[in-house]
Image: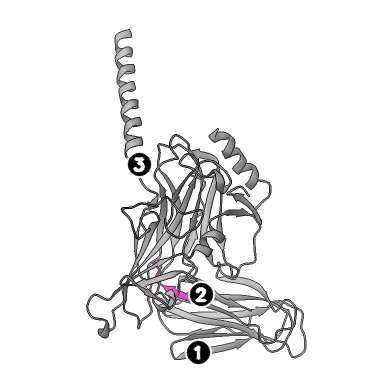
Amino acid sequence: MQKNFKLKLAAATVFTTTVAFMSTSLLAHTRLEVPEVTEGVRTSNNLVIGHGCGENDVIGTSVVFPDGVDSTVTVDGAAYTGKITDFIENWGNLNQKIYSTAVFTFQEEKEDDKENVLGFWAGGGNSLPHHLAGYIPFRVSAATFKADSCAASVKVYVSIADICQITPISGFSAETVNLWTHSNLDTPYDRADDPADPSGNSGPATLTFKRASALPASCGATGQVVEMRPSAAQINRDMPIKYNGTQVWPKP
Amino acid sequence: MCKIYSKQFISMTAFTTLVSLASFSHAHDAGATMDPDGTVAKFTGYASVTCFDDGNGAADHLAVSVKDTSPPVPGLLVNMQVIKGSRAANTTDPVSGDGSFSPEITVQGGNGVYQILVNKTNAGARSFQVSYHCMTSTNAHTGTDITVNQFE
């Protein structure tokens, strides 16, 4: 009996050690459960938080979608001076938070002055253990591609901060926050430069809208690939978490 | 340590219940106040309503109406227009503050983006509610979303 117990204990120890090793060696970026959605279809989605900040649990997350107002738009990799609404006619209020206390207790949407949703945050209550994944639900509404545009797809970069400790910006570190953001926007929320990623785009999650309606004949068979990044001004304005007008994170 | 910071999050957020804004941009029946200072006759609310199949069927038309909830003022009425492609319609709430909506109008444009406008006949603050619903050809409610483009 005692021997069996010892064996079980030994097996459990090996299991724990293995899991601990795996959890620290297989660190996943925070990404969307459904990274591609189809035009005209409303899609339930999740932000998937992959891990904590080292050994620190995640206590909240802040998410920002490009507003399309002063965002940077490219077409087939070239700068485009027009608006995203030249391609997605109803951009501006497509992403809504789905209420859930499965991971965090508190949550709210981030809105512009017309109450269109630009992002959301969730935090407080239980912490997300640093070695477990957490699903934060939201909904992607039905996008409509502009009929006369040549866009075959529109990829949107979604900036995310997974918060492990509430600090001022000066306290940002690998132990306090995971920044899934662009590395070259020149904001305090930029993630560290990655020499292997000159575009600076490897940090954020992506959400790609795939066209379902027919391309105009003049566009050719493949159409254009459109991408949108947020402006630095928007990240500085919308990445902080505010509650009833008071900034909660980063600590002012 | 983590627990301490988690508690900070709670204390920062739990001190009051969430404010429920009268929101123009979420529900399918929504309210707001135009021209709160009462000086802008041209004040216009402009939004895009997207109709799509949410499982109830493809949209056939968008049905809208408007209700002026402010007390009556002579010569000051609230209007609403809906436009898609080459089709448009207009409705006016003929009696302010009586609790009744304007006559409902529809534009038959199938799935896609409809433009809706709310405006008024003169300067003066007007609180109002709009009702907007995408409907199938059998008059079943189907996918309806809104983006507010302008409110000034």
Which color scheme does this rendered protein use?
one colour
Q: Residue at x 68, y 49 (%)?
A: B16
- Judged by depth in the image, the label closer to the viewer, 2 or 1, is 1
Which amino acid, mark 2? Answer: His
| Residues at circles 3 and 1 in contact by the CB criterion of under 8 Å | no
Q: Is residue A217 above or below residue B20?
A: below
Mark 3 and mark 1: Cα distance apart in space: 54 Å
Residue A108 visible in the snapshot: yes
Q: First in sequence: mark 2 or mark 1?
A: 1
Tell me which segment is drawn in magenta: B48-60
Name the residue tied to disc 1. B88
Name the residue tied to disc 2. B133
Closer to us: A181 or B15: A181
Circle 3 sits in a helix, a strand or a loop, which is it?
Answer: loop
Q: Residue at x 30, y 23 (%)?
A: A14
Residue B133 point in image, percent of width and height: 51, 75
Quarter of the image that includes the N terminus of chain A? top left
Looking at the magenta stretch, what is its main secondary structure? loop
Name the residue tied to disc 3. A27
Residue B29 point in image, percent of width and height: 58, 71
- Mark 1 — on which chain does it sit? B
Mark 2 and mark 3: Cα distance apart in space: 45 Å
Residue A233 point in image, percent of width and height: 53, 64
Which amino acid, mark 3? Answer: Leu
Closer to us: A63 or A43: A63
Q: Is residue B54 magenta?
A: yes
Circle 1 sits in a helix, a strand or a loop, which is it?
Answer: strand
Closer to us: A149 or B95: A149
Tags 2 and 3 both on a single chain = no
Q: Residue furthest top?
A: A2
